[in-house]
Amino acid sequence: MQRLFLAIVVFACATLAACSGSSPTPTRPDELLFAVVGTSGEGFQVVDFKTSNGPVHTIAQPCSKENARNDFTSPYAFFLLNAQQPVRGTFQRAVESSDCPAPSSTTSPVPLQLYNFGFNTSTPFRSGEIPPDSDLPVSLATSAQEIKPVNGPDVRVEVCDQDQTPPISNLCSDQVNQQPIPFTASIGDEVATFIACSFFETADTGRPAGTCGTPAIFYLEAPQSFAVAFVANQSPNTGDVVLVNLYINGVLQGTDTASTSNRNAKVQFRF
């Protein structure tokens, strides 16, 4: 039985010998970003993400009268790395019920943008929006082709701003009032490495160029026998802490933090 080793490290990319850049070659799958933008704090749900070389990605959130559902709020970034096209992401507005209060009222359209960094780093490949007055799901896709997901490990890395107010939680799903802490990330395996934030060439988001910002979720499709990711906290504020959660097939397998005083952290999993 093949053993697959996955390591997610919070560190600078310079320590990854295989770092080779984010621009894919013609034989290399793509880096894609589904960006949920617009007014800060608009509630939405992720239905699923589908690629042609990985499993269907869903994010189950707790929901009960005691523990209200933790839906997402804009802005949020979802990266699909090593993804083979066609690729599709499906969203819907946060719907309130008696057991599951929505995190916020969706009063205006929530813009969606799909970037394919093999083609353009500044212009969305596709655009759409989640309407405020409809519960129907909305999809963005690279093409209209049918997607047939394949079996494989569902590797999800959540990166968020850890609230330092006690009691401190080590789960990104528990964090509220997210602040855009800048960070860099490189994720790859023995075949290819993706420097996942280098394509941001401008600082129009208020972050330094070449950085991502919390909150964000990364999926690594079809990882080979060894996979590794590096994330570095780039915040100049000493009180900012980047929290990283690693999930394998929906189960939390590791968590760690990076701060300005200790930028290095590591979570790993061996199949």
Image (cartoon, grey):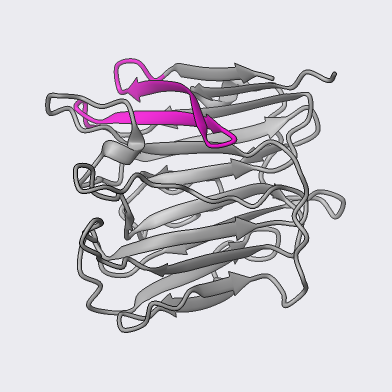
* Count of numbered tags: 0
Q: Nearer the viewer, residue 75 or 154?
A: 154
Residue 250: % across, % down: 53, 37
Q: Which stretch is magenta?
A: 236-263
Q: Main secondary structure of the magenta part?
A: strand
Q: Quadrant of residue 48?
A: bottom right
Q: Position of residue 128 (x, y in %)?
A: 48, 78
Q: Quadrant of the C terminus?
A: top right
Residue drawn at x 36%, y 82% is: 134
In magenta stretch: residue 242: yes
- In what quadrant of the picture does the N terminus appear? top right
Q: Residue, x 26% and y 47% (percent of image)? A: 64
177 lies above or below 36? above
**Magenta span has 189?**
no
Q: Along the line of sight, which residue is nearer the eye, 98 or 243?
A: 98
Please identify the residue farthest to the bottom as the structure is shown. Answer: 133
The answer to whether one can see residue 52 in this image is yes
Q: Is residue 187 left or right of residue 179?
A: right
Lateral position of residue 88 relative to residue 65, left or right? right
Above or below residue 271? Residue 219 is below
Q: Can residue 125 be seen in this snapshot?
A: no
Q: Residue at x 70, y 59 (%)?
A: 118
Q: Is residue 141 above or below residue 226?
A: below
The front one of 188 and 177 is 177
The spot of residue 46 in percent (x, y) is 46, 59
Q: Residue at x 25, y 45 (%)?
A: 179
Q: Hey, which quadrant is residue 147 in on the image?
A: bottom right
* In front of the other: 43 or 209: 43
- Place of residue 161 in the rendered image (x, y in percent of width and height, measured from the top left): 29, 37
